[in-house]
Image (tube, rainbow, N blue to C red):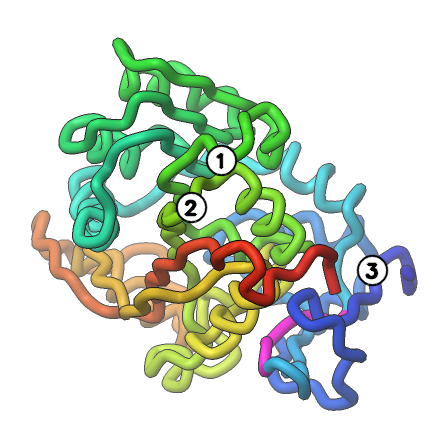
Amino acid sequence: MEESGFLSRTCPVCGGAPPPAVEVRSETSAESLDFTALVPYWNGFFKEKVFFPYSRCRGCGLLYAPIFFNRSQLERLYAQMEPNMSEVPLEALRRTQYGYFEALKSCSHLEGGFIEVGPDIGLFTENCVREGRFDEYWLFEPNRDALPALSKVVEGRTFHVIHDMFGFSKLPERAASVAVLIQVLDHLLDPVGTLRALRQRMSSGAKLLLVTHDESSLLRRLVGWKWPAFCLQHPQIYSPQSICALLDAAGFEVLQQRKTVNFFQISYLVKHLLWAFGWKVRSVPGFGQLTIGLKLGNMLTIATPKAEGKNVPTSAP
Protein backbone atom coordinates (compact mmCIF):
# COMPACT_ATOMS: atom_id res chain seq x y z
CA MET A 1 0.00 0.00 0.00
CA GLU A 2 1.21 3.54 -0.76
CA GLU A 3 0.34 6.95 0.71
CA SER A 4 1.33 10.10 -1.21
CA GLY A 5 3.64 7.95 -3.33
CA PHE A 6 5.35 6.40 -0.29
CA LEU A 7 5.09 2.85 1.02
CA SER A 8 3.00 1.99 4.09
CA ARG A 9 4.64 -0.88 5.99
CA THR A 10 3.79 -3.36 8.69
CA CYS A 11 6.68 -4.48 10.88
CA PRO A 12 9.28 -6.10 8.56
CA VAL A 13 10.26 -8.62 11.26
CA CYS A 14 7.02 -9.91 12.78
CA GLY A 15 4.36 -8.43 10.49
CA GLY A 16 2.70 -6.50 13.33
CA ALA A 17 0.41 -3.56 12.59
CA PRO A 18 2.01 -0.09 12.50
CA PRO A 19 2.25 1.36 16.03
CA PRO A 20 0.06 4.42 16.71
CA ALA A 21 2.83 6.44 18.37
CA VAL A 22 5.99 7.94 16.85
CA GLU A 23 9.18 7.48 18.91
CA VAL A 24 11.73 9.40 16.83
CA ARG A 25 11.15 12.17 14.29
CA SER A 26 13.16 14.96 12.67
CA GLU A 27 12.10 18.61 12.87
CA THR A 28 11.03 18.38 9.24
CA SER A 29 9.37 15.02 8.65
CA ALA A 30 10.15 13.28 5.36
CA GLU A 31 6.53 12.28 4.84
CA SER A 32 5.57 15.98 4.77
CA LEU A 33 7.63 16.44 1.58
CA ASP A 34 7.25 14.86 -1.85
CA PHE A 35 9.81 12.54 -3.42
CA THR A 36 11.48 15.21 -5.57
CA ALA A 37 11.98 17.47 -2.55
CA LEU A 38 13.62 14.62 -0.60
CA VAL A 39 16.27 13.72 -3.20
CA PRO A 40 18.77 16.41 -2.05
CA TYR A 41 18.57 15.05 1.52
CA TRP A 42 19.49 11.51 0.46
CA ASN A 43 23.22 12.11 -0.09
CA GLY A 44 25.66 13.50 2.42
CA PHE A 45 25.76 13.95 6.17
CA PHE A 46 26.25 17.69 6.58
CA LYS A 47 22.77 18.85 5.59
CA GLU A 48 19.56 19.61 7.46
CA LYS A 49 18.42 16.34 9.01
CA VAL A 50 15.25 14.95 7.44
CA PHE A 51 13.99 11.36 7.78
CA PHE A 52 10.80 9.32 8.01
CA PRO A 53 9.44 8.99 11.59
CA TYR A 54 10.38 5.81 13.44
CA SER A 55 7.92 3.86 15.63
CA ARG A 56 8.49 0.82 17.82
CA CYS A 57 6.72 -2.43 17.01
CA ARG A 58 4.63 -3.58 19.97
CA GLY A 59 5.26 -7.22 19.03
CA CYS A 60 9.01 -7.62 18.52
CA GLY A 61 10.35 -4.22 19.62
CA LEU A 62 11.84 -3.25 16.23
CA LEU A 63 12.29 0.49 15.65
CA TYR A 64 11.16 1.07 12.05
CA ALA A 65 9.58 3.61 9.69
CA PRO A 66 5.95 2.64 8.95
CA ILE A 67 6.03 5.09 6.00
CA PHE A 68 9.05 4.84 3.72
CA PHE A 69 10.21 5.07 0.11
CA ASN A 70 8.74 2.45 -2.21
CA ARG A 71 10.99 0.10 -4.20
CA SER A 72 10.97 2.12 -7.41
CA GLN A 73 11.89 5.28 -5.49
CA LEU A 74 14.73 3.47 -3.75
CA GLU A 75 16.07 2.22 -7.08
CA ARG A 76 16.14 5.80 -8.38
CA LEU A 77 17.82 7.10 -5.22
CA TYR A 78 20.55 4.46 -5.14
CA ALA A 79 21.15 4.88 -8.88
CA GLN A 80 21.97 8.58 -8.47
CA MET A 81 23.92 8.10 -5.24
CA GLU A 82 27.34 9.69 -5.28
CA PRO A 83 30.43 7.50 -4.78
CA ASN A 84 31.20 6.79 -1.12
CA MET A 85 34.21 9.02 -0.50
CA SER A 86 34.64 8.35 3.20
CA GLU A 87 36.33 10.95 5.38
CA VAL A 88 37.74 8.10 7.47
CA PRO A 89 41.30 7.16 6.37
CA LEU A 90 41.67 3.80 4.68
CA GLU A 91 43.93 2.40 7.39
CA ALA A 92 41.37 3.28 10.08
CA LEU A 93 38.70 1.49 8.05
CA ARG A 94 40.98 -1.53 7.72
CA ARG A 95 41.52 -1.67 11.48
CA THR A 96 37.76 -1.58 12.03
CA GLN A 97 37.15 -4.34 9.48
CA TYR A 98 39.90 -6.49 10.97
CA GLY A 99 38.15 -6.29 14.32
CA TYR A 100 35.05 -7.76 12.65
CA PHE A 101 37.20 -10.45 11.05
CA GLU A 102 38.72 -11.46 14.39
CA ALA A 103 35.20 -12.13 15.70
CA LEU A 104 34.56 -14.43 12.72
CA LYS A 105 37.95 -16.10 13.09
CA SER A 106 37.13 -17.01 16.69
CA CYS A 107 34.20 -19.22 15.63
CA SER A 108 34.90 -20.34 12.05
CA HIS A 109 37.45 -22.59 10.35
CA LEU A 110 37.55 -20.02 7.49
CA GLU A 111 37.21 -22.65 4.81
CA GLY A 112 34.60 -23.74 2.26
CA GLY A 113 32.51 -21.15 0.41
CA PHE A 114 32.39 -17.45 1.32
CA ILE A 115 29.55 -14.98 0.69
CA GLU A 116 29.72 -11.24 1.30
CA VAL A 117 26.83 -8.90 0.51
CA GLY A 118 28.00 -5.35 -0.08
CA PRO A 119 31.79 -5.84 0.13
CA ASP A 120 32.54 -2.49 -1.61
CA ILE A 121 36.31 -2.55 -2.35
CA GLY A 122 36.90 -5.66 -0.22
CA LEU A 123 38.28 -4.37 3.08
CA PHE A 124 36.73 -7.30 4.97
CA THR A 125 37.26 -9.84 2.19
CA GLU A 126 41.01 -9.16 2.06
CA ASN A 127 41.37 -10.57 5.58
CA CYS A 128 39.61 -13.78 4.50
CA VAL A 129 41.94 -14.10 1.50
CA ARG A 130 45.05 -13.47 3.57
CA GLU A 131 44.25 -15.65 6.60
CA GLY A 132 41.50 -17.99 5.44
CA ARG A 133 41.34 -21.14 3.31
CA PHE A 134 38.11 -20.47 1.41
CA ASP A 135 37.93 -22.28 -1.92
CA GLU A 136 35.30 -20.03 -3.58
CA TYR A 137 34.10 -16.45 -3.10
CA TRP A 138 30.67 -15.02 -4.02
CA LEU A 139 30.68 -11.22 -3.69
CA PHE A 140 27.39 -9.36 -4.18
CA GLU A 141 28.33 -5.76 -4.98
CA PRO A 142 26.02 -3.51 -7.07
CA ASN A 143 28.60 -0.71 -7.43
CA ARG A 144 30.42 -1.51 -10.67
CA ASP A 145 33.02 1.16 -9.91
CA ALA A 146 34.27 -1.08 -7.07
CA LEU A 147 34.90 -4.01 -9.43
CA PRO A 148 38.61 -3.36 -10.26
CA ALA A 149 39.64 -3.01 -6.59
CA LEU A 150 37.43 -5.89 -5.44
CA SER A 151 38.69 -8.22 -8.19
CA LYS A 152 42.27 -7.45 -7.24
CA VAL A 153 41.59 -8.50 -3.64
CA VAL A 154 40.52 -12.00 -4.74
CA GLU A 155 42.95 -12.27 -7.65
CA GLY A 156 44.19 -15.83 -8.05
CA ARG A 157 41.18 -17.30 -6.21
CA THR A 158 37.96 -18.75 -7.56
CA PHE A 159 35.51 -15.86 -7.27
CA HIS A 160 32.30 -14.38 -8.64
CA VAL A 161 31.36 -10.69 -8.40
CA ILE A 162 27.58 -10.47 -8.81
CA HIS A 163 26.07 -7.02 -9.38
CA ASP A 164 22.57 -8.14 -8.41
CA MET A 165 22.74 -7.41 -4.67
CA PHE A 166 20.47 -10.33 -3.78
CA GLY A 167 20.99 -12.73 -6.67
CA PHE A 168 21.45 -15.68 -4.33
CA SER A 169 19.84 -18.02 -6.86
CA LYS A 170 23.15 -17.92 -8.74
CA LEU A 171 24.74 -19.99 -5.94
CA PRO A 172 24.38 -23.73 -5.37
CA GLU A 173 22.35 -24.61 -2.29
CA ARG A 174 24.37 -25.20 0.90
CA ALA A 175 27.49 -23.85 -0.84
CA ALA A 176 28.74 -21.36 1.76
CA SER A 177 30.24 -21.91 5.19
CA VAL A 178 30.36 -18.15 5.92
CA ALA A 179 28.10 -15.23 4.96
CA VAL A 180 28.85 -11.61 5.86
CA LEU A 181 26.63 -8.50 5.78
CA ILE A 182 28.27 -5.36 7.15
CA GLN A 183 25.96 -2.34 7.47
CA VAL A 184 23.48 -3.87 5.01
CA LEU A 185 20.44 -4.98 7.04
CA ASP A 186 19.53 -1.41 8.09
CA HIS A 187 18.86 -0.62 4.40
CA LEU A 188 16.54 -3.52 3.48
CA LEU A 189 12.77 -3.33 3.07
CA ASP A 190 12.48 -7.11 3.52
CA PRO A 191 15.29 -8.25 5.85
CA VAL A 192 13.52 -11.52 6.80
CA GLY A 193 13.05 -12.58 3.18
CA THR A 194 16.65 -11.71 2.34
CA LEU A 195 18.06 -13.74 5.23
CA ARG A 196 15.81 -16.72 4.46
CA ALA A 197 17.03 -16.74 0.85
CA LEU A 198 20.62 -16.49 2.07
CA ARG A 199 20.11 -19.33 4.55
CA GLN A 200 19.29 -21.69 1.66
CA ARG A 201 22.82 -21.08 0.33
CA MET A 202 24.51 -21.81 3.66
CA SER A 203 25.68 -25.22 4.84
CA SER A 204 24.81 -26.81 8.16
CA GLY A 205 26.87 -25.16 10.88
CA ALA A 206 27.75 -22.17 8.68
CA LYS A 207 28.35 -18.79 10.31
CA LEU A 208 26.50 -15.56 9.52
CA LEU A 209 28.24 -12.33 10.57
CA LEU A 210 26.19 -9.14 10.76
CA VAL A 211 27.23 -5.60 11.64
CA THR A 212 24.42 -3.09 12.22
CA HIS A 213 23.73 0.13 14.04
CA ASP A 214 22.48 -0.26 17.63
CA GLU A 215 19.58 2.05 18.48
CA SER A 216 19.89 1.11 22.16
CA SER A 217 23.46 2.48 22.34
CA LEU A 218 24.63 5.20 24.70
CA LEU A 219 25.52 7.49 21.79
CA ARG A 220 21.98 7.28 20.42
CA ARG A 221 20.57 8.17 23.84
CA LEU A 222 22.96 11.12 24.18
CA VAL A 223 22.22 12.80 20.85
CA GLY A 224 18.58 11.73 20.43
CA TRP A 225 17.02 12.24 17.01
CA LYS A 226 20.26 13.79 15.73
CA TRP A 227 22.02 10.39 15.90
CA PRO A 228 23.58 9.89 12.42
CA ALA A 229 21.93 6.49 11.87
CA PHE A 230 18.50 8.14 11.81
CA CYS A 231 18.44 9.02 8.12
CA LEU A 232 16.60 8.53 4.84
CA GLN A 233 18.62 5.43 3.95
CA HIS A 234 17.50 3.34 6.95
CA PRO A 235 13.93 1.97 6.94
CA GLN A 236 14.65 0.31 10.31
CA ILE A 237 17.37 0.27 12.97
CA TYR A 238 18.04 -2.65 15.29
CA SER A 239 18.82 -3.29 18.93
CA PRO A 240 20.32 -6.53 20.32
CA GLN A 241 16.78 -7.72 21.08
CA SER A 242 15.23 -6.90 17.71
CA ILE A 243 18.14 -8.38 15.74
CA CYS A 244 17.56 -11.63 17.67
CA ALA A 245 13.86 -11.50 16.74
CA LEU A 246 14.82 -10.94 13.10
CA LEU A 247 17.23 -13.86 13.02
CA ASP A 248 14.76 -16.17 14.73
CA ALA A 249 12.09 -15.27 12.15
CA ALA A 250 14.59 -15.95 9.34
CA GLY A 251 15.61 -19.37 10.69
CA PHE A 252 18.88 -18.55 12.46
CA GLU A 253 20.15 -19.10 15.98
CA VAL A 254 22.24 -16.34 17.58
CA LEU A 255 25.64 -17.47 18.87
CA GLN A 256 27.11 -14.20 20.10
CA GLN A 257 26.63 -10.44 20.13
CA ARG A 258 29.06 -7.67 21.00
CA LYS A 259 29.58 -3.95 20.62
CA THR A 260 32.09 -3.14 17.90
CA VAL A 261 35.17 -0.95 18.08
CA ASN A 262 35.39 1.51 15.21
CA PHE A 263 38.52 3.52 14.42
CA PHE A 264 38.33 7.22 13.51
CA GLN A 265 40.57 10.25 13.24
CA ILE A 266 39.88 12.61 16.14
CA SER A 267 39.15 15.51 13.74
CA TYR A 268 36.41 13.42 12.11
CA LEU A 269 34.81 12.63 15.48
CA VAL A 270 34.90 16.25 16.66
CA LYS A 271 33.28 17.52 13.46
CA HIS A 272 30.48 14.96 13.58
CA LEU A 273 29.86 15.52 17.29
CA LEU A 274 29.57 19.28 16.80
CA TRP A 275 27.15 18.72 13.93
CA ALA A 276 25.00 16.39 16.03
CA PHE A 277 24.59 19.18 18.59
CA GLY A 278 23.65 21.75 15.96
CA TRP A 279 26.98 23.46 15.21
CA LYS A 280 27.27 23.18 11.43
CA VAL A 281 31.03 23.41 11.08
CA ARG A 282 32.74 22.42 7.85
CA SER A 283 36.20 21.89 9.32
CA VAL A 284 37.87 21.68 12.73
CA PRO A 285 41.46 22.28 13.90
CA GLY A 286 43.73 19.45 12.85
CA PHE A 287 44.81 16.71 15.25
CA GLY A 288 47.40 15.27 12.90
CA GLN A 289 46.68 11.69 11.91
CA LEU A 290 45.77 10.61 15.44
CA THR A 291 43.29 7.73 15.29
CA ILE A 292 41.40 6.18 18.18
CA GLY A 293 39.09 3.19 18.57
CA LEU A 294 35.71 3.70 20.22
CA LYS A 295 32.49 1.78 20.73
CA LEU A 296 30.17 4.21 18.98
CA GLY A 297 26.75 2.72 18.43
CA ASN A 298 27.40 -0.36 16.26
CA MET A 299 26.98 -4.03 17.14
CA LEU A 300 28.19 -7.31 15.71
CA THR A 301 26.08 -10.47 15.71
CA ILE A 302 27.13 -13.99 14.74
CA ALA A 303 24.46 -16.61 14.04
CA THR A 304 24.10 -20.05 12.47
CA PRO A 305 21.22 -21.66 10.53
CA LYS A 306 18.81 -23.55 12.77
CA ALA A 307 18.93 -27.30 12.38
CA GLU A 308 16.31 -28.66 9.99
CA GLY A 309 13.03 -29.21 11.79
CA LYS A 310 14.02 -26.88 14.66
CA ASN A 311 11.13 -24.44 14.26
CA VAL A 312 12.46 -23.09 10.94
CA PRO A 313 9.93 -20.74 9.27
CA THR A 314 9.11 -21.27 5.60
CA SER A 315 7.38 -18.02 4.67
CA ALA A 316 7.77 -14.33 5.34
CA PRO A 317 5.59 -12.57 7.94
Is 62 included in the stretch rendered in magenta?
yes
x and y percentages locating residue 156 in the rendered image = 26, 9
Three-letter residue code for mark 1: Arg
Label 1 neighbour load within 10 Å: few <14, some 14-19, many 20+: some
Mark 1: secondary structure: loop
Which residue: 50% across, 30% down?
Answer: 140
SS assignment for the magenta stretch, majority? loop
Magenta residues, start to end: 61-66
How far, Cα to Cα, is label 1 from label 2? 7 Å
In the depicted view, which residue is nearer to us: 144 or 232?
Answer: 144
Quadrant placement of the C terminus:
bottom right
Q: Is residue 138 left or right of residue 199?
A: left
Residue 215 got which mark? none
Question: Which residue position holds label 1?
Answer: 174
x and y percentages locating residue 130 in the rendered image = 16, 28
For the residues labelled 1 and 2, say whether their Cβ atoms are less than 8 Å apart: yes
Question: Which residue position holds label 2?
Answer: 204
Viewer-side label of 1, 3? 1
Mark 3: secondary structure: strand
Three-letter residue code for mark 2: Ser
